[in-house]
Amino acid sequence: MHYITNTMEFQIYEPTVVTIGKFDGRHRGHQKLMAQMRQVREQYGYRTAVFTFSVVPDAMVTGKAQRVLTTNLERRRNMERTGIDYLVEYPFTQETLHMMPEDFVRDILVGQMNAKAIVVGTDCSFGYQRLGTAQVLRKLSERYHYKLWVIDKEKDEERDISSTYIREELDQGHVEKAWELLGEPYAIHGVVVHGRNMGGRILGFPTANLVPPAGKRLPLFGVYVSRVVVDGQVYRGVTDIGKKPTIQGENPAGVETYIFGLHEDIYGKVIEVQLLAFIRGEKHFGSIEELKAQIGRDKEFAARYFEERPGLGEGSSDFSPR
C-alpha cells in the first residue's frame, strides 16, 4: 500500500476509485464502501484510494479533543489488511477548512488523486461548512468526468451503524456488540513498553503493557477476554484496561495483558489486542492478595470462554462473535 501522509504535495498517476471519510473504526458501513471499490477495481482496473485527514477535523474546528476508535497507526494497518492501494492522510489546515466543495473535487480528488470513480455514503460531507454532499458529487460528475456510486447506510435493525453508535457501546463495556457492528473485534494497537513490572514482580505472572495514544477511545475500564496478535501469531489473553486502583500511586490509564502461552521477550514490538468479552468492571481491592485471587478467577473465566469457542483459539482467523 502507498501511504501518503501530512503533505499537500503529492500526485497519483494511476487512475483511481476514491472514497472519502474519517474511517474511524472501519465498521460494517465502511466495509460496504470498500466492497464497492473492489468491484469497481475489478470492472475498470482502477487502483483503490482512500482520502482522509491526518487529524480529526471536528477537533480542529471546535478546539475540543476528540477521542477516536482508530488511531492513525490502526487505520493504516486496517487499510493494509483491506488491500487498499493508496491511503492519503491529508493535512487539515485553515486552507483546507475553507476549501469550497468544487475546488476540493477538481484540485484534490480529480487532480491529485486522479479519480475516475468515486464511492461515498448517502451522508457524506466535505468542503467549507460541509456544503459538499453526494448530490454535489453527482452534479459535478459530468463536468469532471468521473463515475459515482452512492451507497446506502448499513443498518443494525433500525439504527444506522456509525462510529457514534460503537462508542456508546464501548462506554458500557459492550465489546461483543461493538464486534458485531465493526465486523471484527475492537482492537488496540501499540508498542509494548516497560511498565512498573507489577505482573511479574508482585502478582506472579508477566504481562504486556501498552500506553494507548492520548486520543484513543478506551472502553469502560475493567477486565476483558482478549486475543493478542504478535508477529502475525494469535494468542489468547486477559486484558486489564484502567488505572489499577489497588496499586498505590498515580497510575495513568493503561492496557495490560496476560498472554497465555507466550514466554518470549516482546518489549518494543507492536502488538494488537482484540477485545472479545467483558469479564468485570475496574475495582479497588483491599489487598494485593485479594487482587491476585481475582486475577486467577479472571484467567479461569477466559480459559472457559475459549474452551466453549474453539474457533477463537491460537492462530485462528475466525472472527465471528457468535
Image (cartoon, helix red, strand yellow):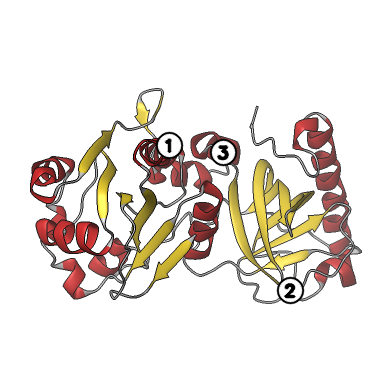
Side of 223 relative to 176 (left or right): right
Side of 211 relative to 40 (left or right): right
What SS does tag 2 mark? loop
Q: Earlier in the sequence, mark 2 or mark 1?
A: 1
What SS does tag 3 mark? helix
Report the Cα–Cα distance between label 3 and label 2: 34 Å
**Image spot of residue 65 (x, y percent):** 37, 67
Disc on res. 179: 3
The C terminus lies in quadrant: top right
- Asked if one can make out residue 20 in the rendered structure from this viewpoint, the answer is no
Disc 1 target residue:
35
**Image spot of residue 134 (x, y percent):** 18, 41
Disc on res. 248: 2
Of discs 2 and 1, which sits in the foreground?
Answer: 1
Report the Cα–Cα distance between label 3 and label 1: 19 Å
Above or below 171: residue 121: above
Amino acid type, label 1:
Ala
Amino acid type, label 3:
Trp
Around disc 1, counting alpha carbons within 10 Å, would you say few (fewer than 14), some (14 to 19), or many (20 or more)? few
Side of 271 relative to 68 (left or right): right
Above or below 304: residue 252: below
What SS does tag 1 mark? helix
Residue at horizontal 80%, vertical 63%?
A: 207
* Closer-to-camera residue (167/271): 271
Residue at horizontal 16%, vertical 54%?
A: 130
Report the Cα–Cα distance between label 2 and label 1: 49 Å
